[in-house]
Amino acid sequence: MSSFSVTEPSKRSKWFAGSLVILYALITMIPLAWIMLTGFKSPADAISYPPKVFFEPTLEGYVNLFTTRTRQTDEFLAANPPETWYEEIVRQYDMVIAGPSKFGERFLNSVIIGFGSTFLSIFLGTLAAYAFSRFKIPLADDLLFFILSTRMMPPIAVAIPIFLMYRQLGLSDTHLGMILLYTAVNISLAVWLLKGFIDEIPREYEEAALIDGYTRFQAFYKVVLPQAATGIASTAIFCLIFAWNEYAFAVLLTSGTAQTAPPFIPTIIGVGGLDWPAVAAGATIFLLPVMIFTVALRKHLLRGITFGAVRK
């Protein structure tokens, strides 16, 4: 007679759960795969109906994404033959490349603002979370609730006051202004998540370090931070995702110098309307940094989500 466990799932249950997870993953990846494929389509194939699954790939979308083009006369085109493969792509529409587009600058702005605000959120959030976890702070519960309440309000609800304040302070359309704004939004999430992780680290580790002659800061830096690395990594991913994808504040507070990629990509104009292959190419490139960052920290993310869920 085989033994039966109420906690261990059966093989059939494991296969069923695994099949559901795989099916869900495939369904959620279809839009992402379609966007990536659209980046290699021609404008005609991108808007064809019914949609084309099999097509002749081209780099026209990526060329249009990274360049600006202008129409020229037949005499000019005849006198100046194309010299590179990407110039040949543009010549199909009787156009020449006038120079690079602004996508590179906007993408760099996203990197600076996204990673800068994430670093600042994690730095300040870790210090605040450690203080709430280890020290007796008057009205700590009220302060934590106040910090959390800043996350409850929709960002667009305070957009106009922030716009007026930034205009007076000269922070509109600046990297510093956007980094500070995204840090202010993300710090509540960082404090609450990191406090939970630091609470799970036994105080005895720090007490032993203090007995060995470490200062409080040394105990925090050499004992607590390595133990909280999992929580810091998972929190950094969530903070980066918000700062990387944020659209409303980026549209309202930036227009040139500090404009990020999300408000710029939809403005890509092609011949006769939106250049969907170029938009898809921009979206694909825009996904890569967050995807690489998340994959690099995937082990920490998985452990961070489940950390502290089971107590002995």
Image (cartoon, rainbow, N blue to C red):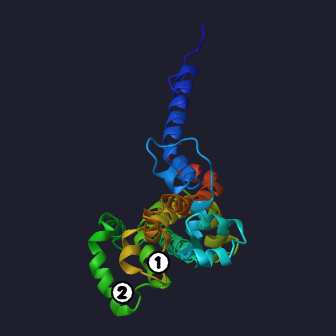
Q: Quadrant of the N terminus?
A: top right
Mark sitting on residue 41: none
Disc 1 packing (10 Å; few <14; some 14–19; many ≥20): many
Image x and y of residue 265, in percent? 47, 67
- Given the image, on which type of amino acid does mark 1 rest? Gln
Instruction: From the top left corner, tell me how far across and down residue 236 is, in percent.
Output: 54, 64
Residue 310 in view in this figure:
no
Residue that numbered label 1 is attached to: 259
Disc 2 target residue: 166
- Nearer to me, 162 or 307: 162
Q: Which one is in front, 86 or 145?
A: 86
Residue 277 appears in view? yes
Name the secondary structure under disc 1: loop
- 27 left or right, relative to 169: right
In front: label 1 or label 2 = 1
Q: Is residue 92 above or below residue 37?
A: below
Dot 2 amino acid type? Tyr
Which numbered disc, 1 or 2, marks the residue that appears first in the sequence?
A: 2
Q: Position of residue 277 (x, y in %)?
A: 52, 58
Residue 103 in the image: x percent, y percent? 55, 73
